[in-house]
Image: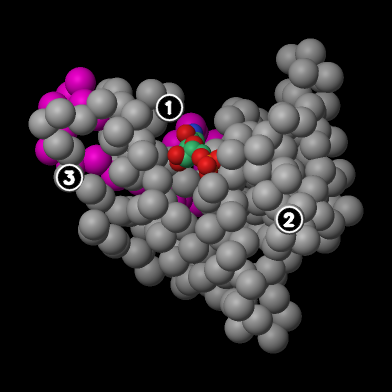
């Protein structure tokens, strides 16, 4: 079995990246990490990737002064140099152009901290609370050129508590993200798009 070479794109702490990479330590996993790439040189996840023996790269978006295609060309160069088959966005906080997304069509996943199609974009936990939701959750989906849209491959839900704050909700959701993303990705890497559904 040839394991699919997987690049994981991050902007921050990289806890979802670690969850994916830990799952891929299993030699029977259909994929393996080939690169962890961040647009931020100070992303905490970079050191965590290095500790796990995964190659890392930084393409600092601030060096491209709003020239998104030039930024993405550099990202593409790094992904190609790592012979990437599949891309997992894991807390990667840059909007991607349709050209970049088309290049990876059907091969790029994202995790979003809401029950899509509810609450695309930012501040999902606060918005779920403001809307009076009784449940909250996260979604893994294929990436298409519309933001936080694309075929849903898995969702996990948690109850909202009376006294929840956005931070408390985010903290309770994160462990579910860490279960959901690897579960979906194992299937996706062998072409299985059957949706995964998890409850706490
Ligand atoms: C996660 O909650 C992820 O769902 C969210 O950022 C966090 C990254 O945490 N992603 C988005 O908001 C994407 N728009 P991590 O760096 O510890 O994985």
At horizontal 34% and vertical 64% (from top left) the residue drawn is: 196
Give the labeled residue for mark 3.
159
Q: Is residue 136 left or right of residue 124?
A: left
Q: Nearer the viewer, mark 3 or mark 1?
A: 3
Q: Is mark 1 within 8 Å of ligand 1?
A: yes
At horizontal 65% and vertical 43% (from top left) the residue drawn is: 45
Q: Is residue 105 magenta?
A: no
- Find out whether the residues at labels 3 and 2 contact each other: C-beta distance under 8 Å: no
Q: Which residues are magenta?
A: 128-152
Q: Position of residue 103 (x, y in %)?
A: 70, 47
Quarter in which the C terminus is drawn: bottom left
Q: Nearer the viewer, mark 3 or mark 2?
A: 2
* Front residue of this view, candidates 136 and 69: 136
Q: Nearer the viewer, mark 1 or mark 2?
A: 2
* Front residue of this view, candidates 33 and 168: 168
Answer with mark 3 or mark 1, whichever residue precedes in sequence: 1
Quarter in which the N terminus is drawn: bottom right
Q: Secondary structure at mark 3?
A: strand
Q: Badge 1: how crowded within 10 Å, few (<14), some, or many (20+)?
A: few
Give the labeled residue for mark 1.
121
Residue 166 in sight: yes
Q: Secondary structure at mark 2?
A: helix
Q: Position of residue 183 (x, y in %)?
A: 44, 66
At horizontal 38% and vertical 69% (from top left) the residue drawn is: 194
Residue occupying the far top of the picture: 65
Q: CA distance from mark 3 to mark 2?
A: 34 Å
């Amino acid at each position: 079995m040839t394991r699919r070479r997987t690049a994981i794109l991050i902007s921050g702490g990289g806890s979802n990246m670690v969850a994916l990479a830990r799952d891929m330590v299993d030699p029977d996993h259909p994929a393996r990490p080939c690169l962890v790439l961040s647009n931020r040189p100070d992303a905490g996840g970079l050191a965590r990737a290095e500790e796990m023996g995964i190659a890392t790269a930084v393409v600092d978006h601030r060096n491209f002064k709003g020239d998104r295609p030039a930024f993405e060309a550099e990202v593409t160069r790094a992904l190609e140099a790592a012979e990437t088959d599949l891309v997992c966005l894991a807390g990667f906080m840059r909007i991607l152009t349709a050209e970049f997304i088309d290049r990876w069509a059907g091969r790029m996943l994202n995790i979003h901290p809401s029950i899509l199609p509810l609450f695309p974009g930012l501040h999902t936990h606060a918005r779920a609370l403001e809307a009076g939701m009784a449940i909250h959750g996260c979604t893994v989906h294929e990436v298409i050129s519309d933001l936080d849209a694309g075929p849903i491959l898995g969702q996990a839900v948690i109850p909202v508590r009376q006294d929840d704050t956005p931070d408390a909700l985010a903290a309770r959701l994160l462990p579910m993200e860490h279960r959901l993303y690897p579960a979906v990705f194992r299937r996706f890497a062998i072409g299985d798009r059957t949706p995964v559904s998890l409850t706490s």
